[in-house]
Amino acid sequence: MTPARRWVALGPGGLDDFALTDVDVPSPARGEVTIEVTAAGVNPADLKHARAATDFPLPIGYEVAGRIVALGPDTEIGSGAAAVGDEVLAFRVSGGYATALTVPAEKVFARPETLGVDEAAGLLLAGTTAADMLRAARTARDELIVLHGASGAVGVAVLQLARLRGIRVIGTAGRRSCERVRDFGGLPVTYGPGVPDRIRAAANGRPIAAALDAVGTDEAVDASLDLVADRSRIVTIAAPRRAAADGFRALGGRQPESAEFRDAVRSNLIRLAADGDLVVPIGAVFGFEQAREALRLVSDGHAGGKVILRTDR
């Protein structure tokens, strides 16, 4: 057993139900790894899933970076052999807001030297979600697509992956974030009344093949429906009710097809990030005891990049 501290939700009431607790982390069995956590990624899903849960206390957090402190017998991590002391990242874990945790080895990957610890902790949830959106919308080279919420963590990952694949993106964002969209390869269009017409003007006569929604507002959904006739090529990660009502696709990491794809693409995303082809902008870094403040910033939607919890602060 390893003593540790961990954030949990004690009920579905949101941040008021979050508590920092003392736990004993079990020693790793065969096929498991114990990680001393340095950084944990903070995501909207952390709070969303806590509010929807029915089984408490619920450990919080899905992605971390740190170092191996114990290995189960005959255990290799997802990217090969490993040793105590190796720097790693892990994704789709349970309870990442912790100073240490034991996880299945297939969720753990070596952290390349060129990838910072904060960037590693914030890479895989947004990155796999972005890649899954591009897959589900059947995007292809030389197409023009629209992306709502283009300046957020998932949006910025979509912009970069699309650029690598030769896909042109018109990205909607707030006025203050348009330069960010442009910096990552998108053609920015501001939110607000008349956004479909501004998107058409930006398209300059080219057809818009697909629409990806990472923000979930009615404005974004209505614009997507206006611009893309084939509803099978409209994808949202934030408006499941509208998707059900209007006949387009809502993605979630727990859907079997998405889960399988996101697991398969992790190693490639790590390689792209290590090579500098996929950047993880960091918007804010909080101390470990500031989880509530970090989640408030993420929930406000104006973090300006990934938000990270550090156990060494």
Image: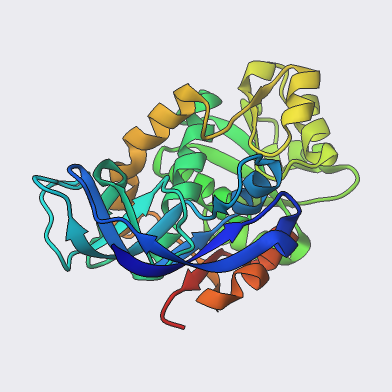
**Picture residue at 91% right of the left edge, 46% below the top:** 193
Q: Nearer the viewer, residue 195 or 23?
A: 23
Query: Residue at (39%, 69%) from the top-left corner?
Result: 4
Residue nearest the viewer, comparing 103 with 250: 103
Q: Quick check: 221 above or below 159?
A: above
Residue beneath the point at 81% across and 20% down: 245
Q: Is residue 6 above or below residue 107?
A: below
| Residue 21 position in % (x across, y down) | 53, 67
Instruction: Residue 62 in the image: state x and y as whole percent.
Output: 47, 51
Residue 302 shows in this picture: no
- 70 or 64, which lies in front? 70
State how the image is colored.
rainbow
Left or right: 268 with respect to 123?
A: left
Residue 300 visible to an observer of this rendering: yes
Residue 115 on image: x %, y %: 31, 65
119 relative to 53 in the view: left or right: left
Of the 4 image quadrants, the one containing the N terminus is bottom left
Q: Position of residue 65 (x, y in %)?
A: 35, 63
Total tally of numbered discs in the picture = 0
Q: Residue at x 49, y 62 (%)?
A: 97
In which image quadrant can residue 96 be found?
bottom left
